[in-house]
Amino acid sequence: MDNKYVCTQNVIHDEVIDKLKGKELNEDKVNELANLFKCMGDPTRVKILNILMNTEACVCDIAVLTNMTHSAISHQLRVLKMSRLVKMRKSGKVVFYSLDDDHVKEIFNKGLNHIIE
């Protein structure tokens, strides 16, 4: 590491401390947020979320679109469901998956826009 970028001073900026006091996230929220981003950090799950951004779909549809096995897709959908990123709806014997809510769509789109710009 280049030494010109190392902070060698021990200066506390009271205005920064005062501004942020009481706005810290508790450990549970820190862990939940980290797990949310970790869950979204898997390429297969990103592909699934991208599909579900546009329509609800069953495991078979998602498997065809991702060129993966039903078992692999089911596993990834289970992870996404546990993280409250997707929800399911049964219609007879078929289970359809969709994004859990508009927040998921917003998070996905914000991330996509960030990498495109």
Image: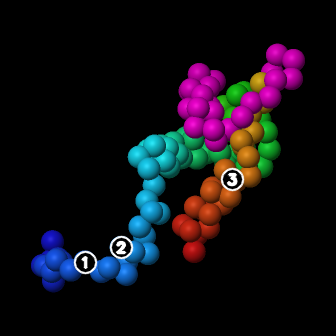
Measured Cα–Cα span from mark 2 to mark 1:
8 Å
**Residue type, mark 1 in image:** Ile
Q: In the rendering, at what x and y percent does residue 70 appear?
A: 63, 24
Assess whether residue 59 is covered by the magenta stretch: no
Q: Which quarter of the picture shows residue 93?
A: top right
Q: Which residue is the site of mark 2?
A: 17
Q: Is residue 10 above or below residue 77?
A: below
Which residue range is magenta in the image?
Answer: 70-94
59 vs 96, nearest the viewer: 96
Query: Which corner quadrant holds the N terminus?
Result: bottom left
Residue 4, image x, y percentages? 15, 83
Residue ranking furthest to the right? 92
Magenta segment includes 76: yes
SS state under label 2: helix
Q: Residue furthest top?
A: 93
In this rendering, would 13 be left or right of 56?
left
Q: Secondary structure at mark 1?
A: loop
Q: Which residue, given by chain and number where applicable, does mark 1 sit on?
A: 12
Circles 3 and 1, Cβ within 8 Å, touching? The answer is: no
